[in-house]
Image (cartoon, rainbow, N blue to C red):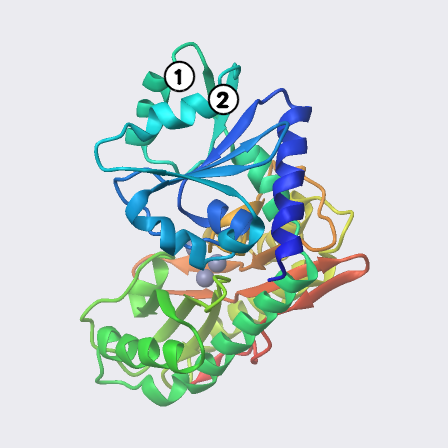
Amino acid sequence: MPESRFAARLAAVGQHASDVGVDAVLVTPGPDLRYLVGYDAVPLERLTCLVVPAHGPASMVVPGLERLAALASPVGRLGLTLHAWGETDNPYALVASLLPDARTVAVDDHMWAQKVLALRAAMPGVEQVLGGPILAARRMRKDPDEVAALMAAGAAIDRVHERVSTWLRAGRTEREVAGDIAEAIIDEGHVRVDFIIVGSGPNGASPHHEVSDRVIEPGDIVVVDIGGTMPDGYRSDCTRTYAIGRPSSDFEDSYAVLKQAQAAAVAHARAGVTCESVDDAARSVLSDAGLGEQFIHRTGHGIGLETHEEPYIVMGNRLMLEAGMAFSIEPGFYSEGRFGARIEDIVIATEDGVVIANNTTRDLVIA
Ligand code: ZN
Ligand code: ZN
Ligand code: ZN
């Protein structure tokens, strides 16, 4: 990521803070920090805090023993002032001293409660608001480097799905299959496995099931939803549905409707339509076929440096999609005690449609 991108992001956050009457945005380790300055610090008890004032240059408070780690990241090339603190100093008082006139500060959504309250104690009378709206407004509009990163993540997880049917067999447990998948997620270019869902038979009816020791049986439907983090921090997330042998014709009919529903939402999504209209595009196809009650979750979520971030593709979200917004389209249907099915792709909105990061077959894969 070129340094100029980080500088532009810091400037935009400062400007946004100024526009909404916030005197500074305070950001501790997590995806917001990585987004703004490229520093992938581990959140620990000692305070690391980027201070982005509404006016003037950003600076960063860091534990003395982590100063070199911070300087080794893009932070060292951005020319930010680093305020290192020693083991017996009060870093919260240090943050307060940088903002003597502040009346309102925004804290990042992931800041630990312990740090939020310590900052409050160090800055009595200063109102704290959530930084989420300011930071998400930037992060949900992906620049071309981020779009390329998400496409690479999509291609990496596609290569894993291409291999899944070789591991899915009757007689193996979900956990054994997940072990093979975990290895492949790393082999195909991720640095971390974020989640593996292998929902066989009745376990598929729980959309956020992970894995269990259930032995896969002939005739099972298996939902495989997997994702990981690439070296640049961007995430993959893709679901395909598999069958152990030929399923019932009833299931095949329902699955064909699901495929249509997913395709309808992908075809509808573009800059200038609302998030909720994308949900409706998928939901109405399932509802018309009598499967609406079995589609028990929203159609999708944004993705980037986090697997779930804004924008959320859900009824009631009137946010207008813009070019560069990246999100999942993942309708499903779930029959308790029997099976589940889901098809999930990551897409990026453009002026006249979407680009699709996941491109393996959306047909039911007979393993
Ligand atoms: Zn999910
Ligand atoms: Zn997802
Ligand atoms: Zn998923």
Is 185 left or right of 21, judged from the image as shown? left
Q: Residue at x 49, y 17 (%)?
A: 100
- Tell me the residue that label 2 is attached to: 99
Kind of residue at badge 2 = Leu
Which type of secondary structure does the marked residue at label 2 adopt? loop
Q: Residue 200: x percent and y percent?
A: 31, 71
Q: Position of residue 118 (x, y in %)?
A: 31, 24
* Front residue of 345 and 217: 345
Callout 2–callout 1 Cβ contact below 8 Å:
yes
Kindly give the residue lying farthest to the right in the view shown. Answer: 352
Give the SS element for disc 1.
Answer: loop
Nearer to us: label 2 or label 1: 2
Q: Give above or below for 147 relative to 97.
A: below
Q: Is residue 234 visible?
A: yes
Q: Position of residue 243 (x, y in %)?
A: 40, 80
Between 74 and 259, the one nearer to me in the picture: 74
- Circle 1 is placed at which residue position? 123
State the image quarter where residue 89 is shown.
Answer: top left
**In the image, the residue with mark 2 has its CB under 8 Å from the nearest atom of ligand 1:** no
At x 57%, y 71%, the residue is 256
Quadrant that contains the N terminus: bottom right
Mark 1 or mark 2, which is nearer the start of the sequence? 2
How dense is the environment of label 2, judged by Cα within 10 Å: few (below 14), some, or many (20 and up)? Answer: some
Name the amino acid, label 1. Met
Residue extending farthest to the bottom is 166
| Along the line of sight, the residue nearer the viewer: 21 or 272 | 21
Q: Residue at x 68, y 32 (%)?
A: 15
